[in-house]
Image (cartoon, grey):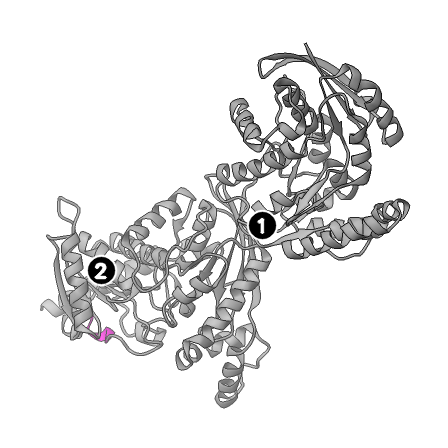
Amino acid sequence: MKHVVTVSLGSSAKDHEFETEFLGHPMRVTRLGADGDETRAWELLRRQQAQADAIGVGMVRDHYEVGARRYVHKDTERLMNVVTRCPATTGARLRRMLQVRALRYVQRKLVNYFNNNHVLFLSGMRNYEMALAMQDYTKNLTFADAVFGTGTPKLLKSIRSLEMFARTARVATRVLPDKLTDRLARLTKTKKGTIAKAFESSHVIVGTFADIEACGTPANLKGKTVITSAIDDEREAFFRDCEVNLVVDVSPMLFEGRVVGMNTIQAMILAALEINSEELTDHDLREIIDELEIAPRLLHPTGTFRNIRRFAFVVHPLSQEYIKKGFPVPKSTPKAIMNQVEKAAAHMPPMIYTKMDNIISPAGAEAEGWLISVGGTPKEMLTRNPEFTYRRLLAAARMAEKMGAQILGLGAFTKVVGDAGVTVARRAHIPVTSGNSYSASGALWAAADAMRRMGLVKTHEDGRVKAKTMVVGASGSIGSVSSRLLAMAFDEVYLAGRTISKLEALKESILKETPEAKVVATVDYEQYLGDMDMIVTSTSGAGKKVLDITKVKPGCVITDVARPLDLPPEEVAKRPDVLVIESGEIELPSDVNMKDIGLPKNVIYACLAETIVLALEGRFEVYTIGRDTEWQKVKEIYKMGLKHGMKLAAISGVNGVYSDEDIAKVVELARKARQTTAA
């Protein structure tokens, strides 16, 4: 039977011995603690090597490689040099390999879990390989090496600064006496305060249990993710008391519920293979890890795991009236002065309007996010070069990235300007979506619900609606998708716009997908308004009149998707026998904390809902940008929304929510108007 001994600087109260079979060999494992006394550890190593097949050295500071340089810790080297009769290891190579694999495992299993997280490494030098791997998922990395090593109350903010600090530290350890470097490394009250504050602003904390315990409290660890190793019942109880959300234990539990350190496992590998540390290759380790099916342990100390995703969404004032609501501008301010205020607002840097939290999906996912306001009104955006707006949107994207948002949505006119989000998505460091897929879905969802409640049209046996519909602005992003979907459901679809060549191209494309559809393309569309049972307006006319509502058929449902609205209140008021709805707003699945955005509580715009649904789904990707929205994505986002509990909100018009009585009144007036017309 092979004998593996672990000598640890940890407590001797945790000493133990057990027998097991490992890699086909019976083994006896003995753990001996030195209670923090390096002299005692040195003596234990000297004595035990004669009766051991391999020795693990635990709770010591590892040698490590940062950048192209290797850094040797003198105290650890002195202890390792004692062992001359058998292989010895600190387990550093195995630990580093399992750390990176654990990171990839969690990112895959929990679907993009680390994307744009704020990650605090208590020792970036000790965990350099993991930091490099984490950099694939987020740039928000912070390192506490300078705080622990020198007492400087300053955190390192990049891999490059970590490498520079490591070079400086290497020189210092060669020049300065050991007593001075040890004194600098002590954890003072000031250091604890600096690191404890960093805990609060981080989503993920990486470090040894000893370092985390020294600075962690229930206040700064609550809801956090911790990546560490060798978590036993006692340590898990600490994390439970601190209400930690997730603990990723890099150390596998291979021996009947017993947690052992990496140094022990690597020493057991050396004993089983009968080789020394220098002969053990990374390839050997990878093969053994695969053979043993080693995976990290994902622990939920509180018993409940909350997978909270984060988003940001850009909003802006739609008119001077919105500026008056958001800023202390007197309502009686003259128009000439308001024009100057409007211009000045367009130059303002982005700012947080409100935070949204407690968005809980019935599927178990959660989301929180920020609405970031830029100051330009549609008028200002359209009168300036697109680059003017791009710069403000990219500043908002940088703000969102810094806060930890994992996806950014563009609202209202920010998704219309220039190339409809393509440039912003290309330049931003986090994925961007315009929300147009859900806007199209929500608009048609609302229209279908309105027509059902009105009961003025009938359907064929195959489900197609016995009605005519028109899309004004059909060649636009939302308009083209609406046209494709309506062609599948209505008897006739009229594509209305300003450029006949674009409309004809869209018609040809629709007929390839739906050959049986009847599609008409026209730029002279007002002559057909009186025949339409439903109209979707989706222009970017910025307040220009796009249709004469007085010519519309009584009982027609008009879905106004445009922002600003194509049909202002004064136009809608001309036809009380027509139901005009402001697209399809979405009701969230939970009671959300947020400031007023001009809609009923828990109701949001469909474009914002798309951003939230993608966050809940963990789909941190460029989803909808440009002017050619894919109708497949319109259907997909609709299904994802249903999965996460999104509902069509009460149908709203320019004067607020339509009640059943309001809709019944429109139907009554429409029937009377039709009778008068027929007579």
Kindly identify the amino acid type of the residue bearing the numbered disc 1: Asn
Is 622 one of the magenta-colored residues?
Answer: no
Is residue 148 rendered to the left or right of residue 409?
Answer: right
Residue at coordinates 24% horizontally, 73% vertically from top-left? 549
Q: Nearer the viewer, mark 1 or mark 2?
A: 1
Give coordinates of residue 45: x percent, y percent.
81, 24
Label 2 SS: helix
Q: Earlier in the sequence, mark 1 or mark 2?
A: 1
Which span is picked out in magenta? 548-552
Which residue, as the protein is rendered here, is positioned at the far top? 1
Residue beneath disc 2 = 483
Pick the front one: 141 or 304: 141
Give coordinates of residue 18: x percent, y percent.
71, 13
Is residue 463 rendered to the left or right of residue 447?
Answer: left
Query: Are there few (<14), some (14-19), or many (20+) residues within 10 Å of tag 2?
Result: many
Q: Residue 223 carries which label?
A: none
User: What is the spatial separation of the Cα atoms under label 1 and label 2, in whole angstroms?
Assistant: 40 Å
Pick the front one: 621 or 57: 57
Residue beneath disc 1 = 117
